Image (spheres, helix red, strand yellow):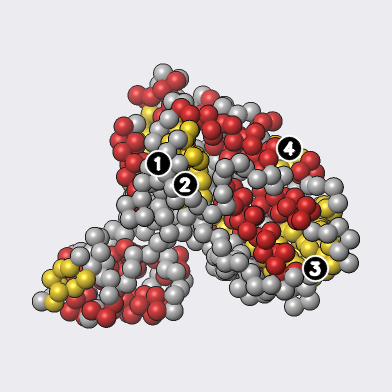
Amino acid sequence: MEKMIAGKTIAVNEEGYLTDFNQWDRNVAEEIAKENEVEMSDKHWKVIEYLQKEHQNQVPLSIRKIGKSNVVDIKEFYELFPNGPLKISTKIAGIPKPASCL
Amino acid sequence: MNRIVILGAGTAGTMMANHLSHELAKGDWEINIIDEKHDHYYQPGYLFLPFDIYKPQDIVKQIEEFIPKGVKLIKGIIEKIEPEKNEVLMANGTAISYKILIVATGAKIAPEEVSGMKGSEWQKSVFDFYTFDGALALRDKLRDWEGGNLVVHITEMPIKCPVAPLEFAFLADSFFHNKKMREKVEITFVTPLSGAFTKPKATEALDHLMVDKNIHLVSDFAIEQVDNENKKIIDYGGKEVPFDLLVTVPTNKGDELMERSGLGDDLNYVPTNKGSLQSLAHENIFVIGDASNIPASKAGSVAHFEAEILTENIKRFINNEPLKEEFDGHANCFIETGHGKALLIDFNYSHEPVEGTFPFPGVGPLRLLKESRMNHMGKLAFRWIYWNMLLKGTHIPFVSATMQEAGKEFENA
């Protein structure tokens, strides 16, 4: 699937997650954030960078792990990305939705 | 003589003891299995105990009954694994050396991970059913509970038998119907996931069943605390769910032994190669069942399929041959849906559960992802299979360790 995001044609899956991280940039992230009613701040970007780095190192992401990351605690994570912070933050970060689960 | 040591005489460890005692030459290898407990519990039975469907004696037998002759059962508490010395240190001070170590120490609940969970209402209005004691206490509570808000809750993934909480909600619906008091009970299912289950296809089918059975769903709920005073659970986002009776599945963790030995991740699961079941840190340590961190379901059926592949890999390791990376995450689970029916799902790492027939393509008799009485009979028959075939490592006819793709309706198979 393709979607116009911030004036660019971006490849996404049926849930709206980017399928090619090379197409990600800050403008794309800003627009996905807006769609999810998130206003990006420095703190938000710190979390996004952390998620991207962990994903690059193939570390499976979970709320528990992010709470121990020293970037945010779980409470702050929820304040930054209300209603399903892991789902929303990974979408903004341009990385796959974590399969937290089984 | 060379020694293989198995840690844990639960489902996975017992199966490995049986497999290896058949496969390895007696004169060459001594097999030890260590556990601190006396009894072996049929854990799938914990689901039925609260509803008086099974009696306690149906699901408990002695560990000894299932350990084959020629395998030495050591009862005692393990203090530490010392991988550099290839030794297991016991709490009583003795050291047991090994050539090969198999970790089968399982997973268990850790209610202390959530603030207030093991508080003043624990086993009064807050219960678990993932332990024998918890399931029994809940049975006593349900026998004369007069109704109200029943909240069935999952704390965080991964958990053992990920469908069990949903089955509990379905069986509760059935139970209160039979007691002619269903209208006095509101059932709410609260989960950290976005839907009823972890796999999209099955979630669709299960979400539908929940609507049919008038079970409310609260999704994306990451619990922060149990408020004992006001009887509600509160999530990090501030969402609140009130309860009169909370049946929760607490955080599941691997054994503390892994933490003491420096072998576990942040939930005490052992990092393991998901295809070969060899631990990532030490080539002569293997991991089976719930104790590993592989992305497969934590379930007896998974341990059963793993055991066939691990046995082959242990033989290869002994002969200095390359290991097979063959385990595909195969799981096969009955899902009780109440009113004498059940679903069956069959899936692996790459294929989610779909509709079809099992185990014979096109024939069945079991139907995948569809409710039927035959599936329910299958689930009840499974207890016999467990005690008489599964633990003994007998191959279950027609069911292969890796998943079969014939007879299933894959969209892009």
- Is B115 situated left or right of B217 in this image? right
In primary-sequence order, the first of circles 2 and 1 is 2
| Residue at 69% over, 72% down | B321
Q: The residue tagged with tag 1: helix, strand or loop? A: strand
Q: Considering the image in quadrants, where does the C terminus of chain B appear?
A: bottom left
Residue furthest to the top in view is B180
Which residue occupies 72% across, 64% down?
A: B315
Type of amino acid under label 4: Lys
Q: Nearer the viewer, mark 1 or mark 4?
A: 1
Disc 2 from disc 1: Cα separation = 10 Å
Q: Amino acid at mark 3?
A: Tyr
Q: Which residue is mark 2?
A: B346
Nearest-to-viewer mark from 3 and 2:
2
N-terminal of the pair, mark 3 or mark 4, is 4
Marks 2/1 in contact by CB < 8 Å: the verdict is yes
What is the spatial separation of the Cα atoms under label 1 and label 4, in whole angstroms?
35 Å
The quarter of the picture where residue B205 lies is top left
**CB contact under 8 Å: marks 3 and 1:** no
Residue B356: mark: 1
* Circle 3 chain: B
